[in-house]
Amino acid sequence: MKSPTTAKEAPTINNLKRIREEYPLTVCELADLAGVSHNTVWRLEAGRTGARPATVRKLARALKVRPKDLALPPFGKAVRNGRARHRDDG
């Protein structure tokens, strides 16, 4: 039996809230699209837990971004609808 992933072991997804709000989607709307609970999305955005790889993939698919785009530093590139752009491009 697998042990639960702890926040220290799981990757953080720094850009989840920023990318979600660009669409714009609510926490509940993203949770429904990704097939995860709204509590999971909230906890990830608040940094209260790390994300399991399967959860990162589900969220990335729902937001139409690559999984690694969710973990880029806050001042990295934002990707939306498959088109990368720099944050300061406006």
Image (tube, helix red, strand yellow):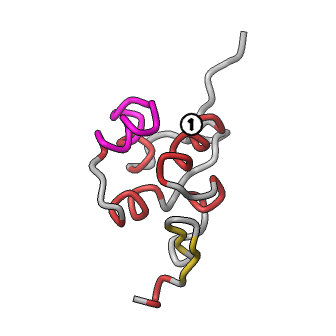
Looking at the rendering, the stretch of residues picked out in magenta corresponds to 28-41
- Identify the residue at horizontal 31%, vertical 45% (top origin): 27
In this rendering, the answer to whether 64 lies above or below 53 is: below
Q: Magenta segment: does it hold 29?
A: yes
- In percent of width and height, residue 47 lies at 45, 49
Q: Is mark 1 on a helix, strand or loop?
A: helix
Q: Tag 1: Cα neighbours inside 10 Å, few (<14), some, or many (≥20)?
A: some
Task: Name the image quarter holding the N terminus.
Answer: top right
Q: In which quarter of the image is residue 79?
A: bottom right
- Identify the residue at horizontal 71%, vertical 16% (top origin): 2
Q: Which residue of the protein is positioned furthest toward the bottom in this rendering?
A: 89
Q: Which residue of the protein is positioned furthest toward the top in this rendering?
A: 1
Q: Nearer the viewer, residue 72 or 61?
A: 61
- Identify the residue at horizontal 63%, vertical 47% (top origin): 11
Left or right: residue 12 versus residue 68 is left
What amino acid type is highlighted by mark number 1?
Thr
Q: Main secondary structure of the magenta part?
A: helix
Q: Magenta segment: does it hold 40?
A: yes
Residue where numbered disc 1 is placed: 55
Task: Name the image quarter holding the C terminus.
Answer: bottom left
Q: Which residue of the protein is positioned furthest toward the right in this rendering?
A: 1
